[in-house]
Image: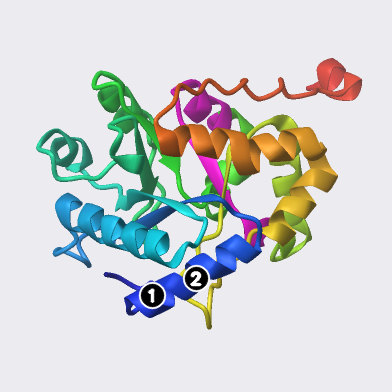
């Protein structure tokens, strides 16, 4: 339906790869943005249900949930209220959102408007946005407004440089990472791999917290269950900074 698997066979192979990675629950999603005008909420939902039926028939133990990855725009809130956007798992609780190409938008106005409808935001592949990754104060504000941060497993396993690794580790240890995603697009490129990212996360924060991020919290979101994550840890300020600013 977009730049992901070209047909059901590839989608099925991706699901098998996820199962081999130890995954039991995942989103079956497609983009909702101006590049894919035919990806209506109903069509994305129906496609996910078709995949779910195939998985059941093939006895592949992966639970998939219909979801859209929504590109933020000036009319996102209007589209949601008009019934044009598909929420995570179709539970009317979370919208998975990303930024327009080359842009970085402040999500706080979106979060405030959608909160009135009982809807919160999940920031897809949040590690891509350096103005957010490098600004803990801004990240605090977005989380305080009800947002969750999803990070791509491969970004944890293979950071692009030392600065990116440092920033991701700081996020992980500070409590800024809530969900783990594969960003899987196919079996030949951007493969749906999770294990290596989980292992890096476990080294940074321990198995218990890694299991929350890579399992417990994601299952709650996908199933439409209540979820309240702890706020990030307060930023530690050295005595030198306190004295001299």
Picture coordinates of residue 21, whole percent (x, y) = 65, 62
- Binning the other alpha carbons within 10 Å of mark 1 as few (below 14), some (14 to 19) or many (20 upward) gives some
Q: In this rendering, would 98 be left or right of 87?
A: right
Q: In this rendering, would 103 be left or right of 158?
A: left
Q: Is residue 45 above or below residue 139?
A: below
The label on residue 14 is 2
Q: Find out whether residue 142 is within the magenta segment.
A: yes
Magenta stretch in the rendered image: 138-156
Picture coordinates of residue 154, whole percent (x, y) = 64, 62
Secondary structure found at label 1: loop
Of labels 1 and 2, the one closer to you: 2
Residue depicted at x 20% and y 35%: 77
Q: Find out whether residue 16 is within the magenta segment.
A: no
Residue depicted at x 30% and y 32%: 110
Residue depicted at x 43% and y 67%: 58
Q: Are marks 1 and 2 in contact (CB under 8 Å)?
A: yes
The answer to which of 133 and 93 lies nearer the viewer is 93
Quadrant for the C terminus, please: top right
Instruction: Tally the marks.
Output: 2
Picture coordinates of residue 223, whole percent (x, y) = 42, 35
Secondary structure found at label 2: helix
Q: Which residue is mark 1?
A: 5
């Amino acid at each position: 339906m977009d730049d992901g698997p070209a047909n059901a066979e590839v989608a099925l192979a991706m699901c098998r790869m996820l199962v081999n990675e130890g995954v039991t629950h995942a989103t079956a999603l497609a983009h909702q943005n101006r590049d894919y005008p035919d990806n209506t909420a109903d069509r994305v939902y129906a496609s996910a249900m078709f995949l779910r039926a195939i998985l059941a028939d093939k006895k592949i133990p992966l639970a998939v949930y219909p979801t859209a990855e929504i590109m933020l725009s000036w009319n996102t809130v209007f589209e949601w209220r008009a019934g044009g956007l598909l929420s995570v798992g179709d539970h009317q609780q979370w919208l998975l959102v990303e930024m327009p190409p080359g842009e970085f938008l402040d999500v706080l106005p979106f979060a405030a408007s959608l909160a009135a409808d009982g809807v919160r935001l999940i920031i897809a592949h949040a590690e891509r946005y350096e103005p957010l990754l490098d600004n803990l104060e801004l990240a605090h504000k977005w989380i305080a407004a009800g947002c969750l941060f999803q990070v791509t497993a491969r970004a944890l396993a293979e950071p692009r440089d030392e600065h990116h690794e440092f920033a991701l580790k700081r996020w992980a240890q500070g409590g800024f990472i809530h969900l783990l995603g594969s960003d899987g697009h196919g079996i030949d490129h951007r493969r749906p791999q999770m294990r290596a990212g989980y292992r890096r996360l476990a080294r940074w924060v321990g198995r218990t917290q890694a299991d929350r991020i890579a399992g417990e919290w994601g299952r709650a979101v996908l199933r439409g269950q209540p979820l309240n994550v702890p706020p990030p840890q307060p930023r530690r300020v050295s005595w030198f900074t306190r004295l001299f600013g």
